[in-house]
Image: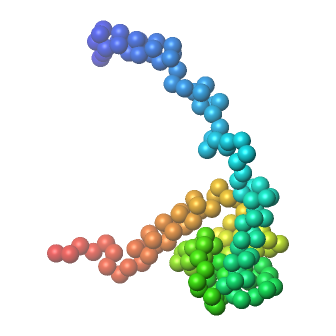
Amino acid sequence: MRSKKQTERQLLLMESSLAYPRGKEENSKKLKGRQKTEGETDTRDPGVSDLAFSELSSTVKFRFRKQDIDDNDIGNFLSGEAKALQFNHSNLWTCARMASARQGIRWEFVDKEPRLIFGDLVLKASNRKKILFSLRDRLKLLRGDSLLAKPDQGKVIE
């Protein structure tokens, strides 16, 4: 049972919390994520997407020594499946290629729109918020499954 002093403290705490709410009004006013400043663009901006795709296309043309490339060439390049002929050109796209090959992620392009394929999971550009979460979650599950599949799992060394 509470003493009179504890009850008084409890009432004071309740009154102070009602008088000074903990920012629920402020949180509802705030936008989620990073604030976008004036003049700043993101990947949904067609200009940024076109610029990134042209940089990717020029990288693939240089690495494959081809003048005409299609969506299949770009997907094979980023997946690390096709063998590049030039190696003295490094940029963001070559780093993405190495990371994709290391993680076992395949890229497909359909009408210049990328899709990531990781096992049976297909992620489109419209699901950009789910990409990192889905990849991390899938890798975590694969690591757990590989540990459970080991023959000495659960045995204690004496």
Q: Quadrant of residue 82?
A: bottom right
Q: Quadrant of residue 143?
A: bottom left
Q: Quadrant of residue 39?
A: top right
Could you tell me which quadrant the C terminus lies in?
bottom left
141 shown above or below 22? below
Which of 111 and 151 lies nearest the eye of the viewer? 111
Position of residue 123 measured from the top left corner of the image (x, y, whole percent): 68, 66
Residue found at the far front of this picture = 88
Position of residue 27 measured from the top left corner of the image (x, y, whole percent): 59, 31
Residue at 47 percent across and 18 percent down: it is 17
Residue at 72 percent across and 66 percent down: it is 52
Residue at 29 percent across and 17 percent down: it is 1
Which of 150 and 62 lies nearest the eye of the viewer? 62
24 shown above or below 82? above
Residue at 70 percent across and 53 percent down: it is 42
Q: Is residue 32 visible?
A: yes
* In the displayed structure image, the side of residue 96 where residue 153 appears, left or right: left
